[in-house]
Amino acid sequence: MEKGEYRRVAAELGLAIIAPDTSPRGADVPDEPDNWQFGCGAGFYVDASEAPYEMHYRMYSYIRDELPVLVGNAFNLDMSRQGIFGHSMGGHGALVMALRNPDRFRSASAFAPIVNPSTADLSSSAFTRYLGSDQAAWRAYDAVSLVEDGHSFPEILIDQGDADSFLKLGLRPWLLETAVAGTKTELTLRMQPGYGHSYYFISSFMEDHLRWHAARL
């Protein structure tokens, strides 16, 4: 968020931006410091069921239940008007949160999200370690699977760079585009020529996303 150039537009639109961490932190939290795709580098916004991660790696419940209460108690905000967005793994988390909680959020968008983590090289090994080998449990944290299982959200905006090195390895937004066809979910997928996965990509389209959310909040 610090590199995403959000402050000017957020201030203009009167939006409060809350940016939670990717994972739990602390000396007692199991981690693999050299692995950016797991542990404190990537919690995948799931409620882990497998040891030794099940105690601390409960980021789904934290975002859904605990964080809104903390924010609402600390700041004078209208908590009935919430949107959610994120980038990459955070985009995955935002889509899952919106699809599973459509009454909580009025708007949802993502930058280069992992839309089908159950089948992506970037994420499937982490899902096994957090959620176990029963892939039926993975579906609750997979946007494509959620849509296939009947979940929906009115409108979703996704921006994706066509030069993203992770595009075919794990992001694959066209899978979500196929899944929502004929459903109640209207997806706007914008493939951006020449853009990669970096913060330059996010900063280029951050204003579009903030205005998208403001119009729906």
Image (cartoon, grey):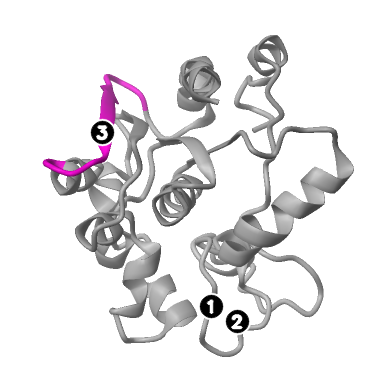
Query: What residue sits right under mark 1 in the picture?
Result: 48
Residue 185 belongs to magenta span: yes
Left or right, residue 162 beside residue 89? left
Q: Is residue 95 visible?
A: yes
Q: Position of residue 199 (x, y in %)?
A: 53, 29
Left or right, residue 5 beside residue 216? right
Mark positioned earlier in the residue sequence (2 or 3): 2
Instruction: Nearest to the eye among marks 2 and 1: give it.
Output: 1
SS label for mark 1: loop
Q: Amino acid at mark 3?
A: Glu
Residue drawn at (18%, 44%) of the image: 183
Q: Amino acid at mark 2?
A: Tyr
Residue drawn at (61%, 71%) of the image: 58
Q: Position of residue 176 (x, y in %)?
A: 23, 46
SS label for mark 2: loop
Disc sitting over residue 186 in the figure: 3
Whether residues under marks 2 and 1 lie with C-beta atoms below 8 angstroms apart, the answer is yes
Q: Position of residue 196 (x, y in %)?
A: 37, 30
